[in-house]
Image (tube, grey):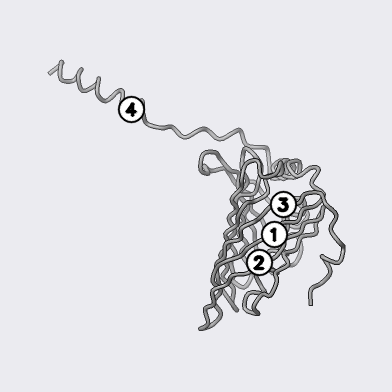
């Protein structure tokens, strides 16, 4: 009996040693302000970017469901100008461009939302911090939840909850080395609004970073 137990232990021990143990999360910053500061620092030196975008997905409005395949260009100008210009967008899909254009960016979120650091969680092979909070001013947005990489401080997901029950969930995939600013390589978007719902994948081309952008790009679109 004793021999059997010893043999069993000899078998179980090596197996136990092969069990992967999740990596511990880095020590969390003190509060949301510290996370946001590190996010802004990761964008330090980024004055502007423009990038071609291809969009594919499906938009549903009432009984109509329409596959979408579009292209456009996304522009960013520090500190707070951002717009997605879609070429030849069908009427049913025009809200998508407006949604991306009003999403905001790390330098604007501390100004627009009263964010709190609510915890940390595993994300793929690393960890992420979770920020949540309502807008600081009257808005159609009820609250926003932002997941931030604990290693690069890039945004990994954003969820907007609206006062009318609508929801917008955005997940960003980053490509190491694409730019020093950890800008996304692709974005998946799922929207549920009273007038329409849909999902889309945005794939980004080559970024032009810190190149002049004509002011007219950010003029109201008609």
Would you call the spot at circle 2 few (<14 residues within 10 Å), some (14-19), or many (20 or more)? some
Outermost residue, left side: 1
Using the numbered discs, state the Cα–Cα distance from disc 1 to disc 4 in whole angstroms.
Answer: 49 Å
At 69% from the left and 52% from the top, the residue drawn is: 206
**Dot in front, 2 or 4:** 2
Which residue is denoted by mark 4 in the rendering?
16
123 shown above or below 191: above
Q: Identify the secondary structure beneath mark 1.
A: strand
Outermost residue, right side: 215
Quick check: 161 left or right of 87? left
Which residue is denoted by mark 3 in the rendering?
207
The answer to whether the residue labelled 1 contacts the one labelled 2, judged by CB atoms less than 8 Å apart, is: yes
Q: How many marks?
A: 4
Which residue is denoted by mark 2 in the rendering?
71
Q: Earlier in the sequence, mark 4 or mark 3?
A: 4
Which residue is denoted by mark 1 in the rendering?
52
Would you call the spot at circle 3 few (<14 residues within 10 Å), some (14-19), or many (20 or more)? some
Which image quadrant is residue 144 in? bottom right
Q: Earlier in the sequence, mark 2 or mark 4?
A: 4
Q: Earlier in the sequence, mark 1 or mark 3?
A: 1
Using the numbered discs, state the Cα–Cα distance from disc 3 to disc 2 in whole angstroms.
Answer: 15 Å
Using the numbered discs, state the Cα–Cα distance from disc 1 to disc 2 in whole angstroms.
Answer: 7 Å
Q: Identify the secondary structure beneath mark 2.
A: strand
At 54% from the left and 82% from the top, the residue drawn is: 62
Q: Earlier in the sequence, mark 1 or mark 2?
A: 1
**Dot in front, 4 or 3:** 3
Q: Identify the secondary structure beneath mark 4.
A: helix
The quadrant of the picture occupied by the N terminus is top left
Using the numbered discs, state the Cα–Cα distance from disc 1 to disc 3 in whole angstroms.
Answer: 8 Å
Outermost residue, bottom side: 63
At 68% from the left and 75% from the top, the residue drawn is: 88
Q: Earlier in the sequence, mark 3 or mark 2?
A: 2
């Amino acid at each position: 009996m004793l021999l059997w137990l010893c043999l069993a232990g000899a078998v179980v021990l090596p197996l136990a040693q092969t069990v992967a143990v999740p990596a511990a999360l880095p020590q969390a910053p003190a509060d949301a302000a510290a996370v946001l500061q590190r996010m802004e620092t990761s964008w330090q030196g980024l004055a502007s970017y423009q990038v071609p975008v291809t969009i594919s997905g499906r938009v549903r409005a009432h009984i109509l469901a329409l596959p979408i395949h579009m292209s456009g260009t996304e522009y960013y100008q520090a500190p707070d100008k951002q717009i997605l210009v879609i070429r030849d967008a069908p009427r049913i899909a025009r809200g998508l461009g407006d949604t991306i254009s009003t999403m905001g960016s790390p330098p604007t979120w501390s100004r627009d939302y009263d964010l709190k650091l609510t915890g940390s969680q595993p994300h793929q092979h690393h960890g992420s911090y979770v920020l949540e909070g309502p807008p600081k001013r009257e808005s159609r947005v009820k609250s926003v939840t932002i997941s931030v990489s604990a290693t690069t401080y890039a945004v990994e997901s954003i969820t907007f909850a609206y006062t009318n029950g609508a929801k917008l969930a955005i997940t960003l995939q980053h490509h190491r080395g694409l730019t020093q600013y950890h800008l996304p390589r692709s974005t998946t978007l799922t929207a549920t609004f009273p007038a329409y719902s849909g999902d889309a994948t945005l794939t980004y081309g080559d970024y032009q970073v810190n190149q002049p952008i004509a002011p007219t790009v950010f003029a109201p679109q008609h």
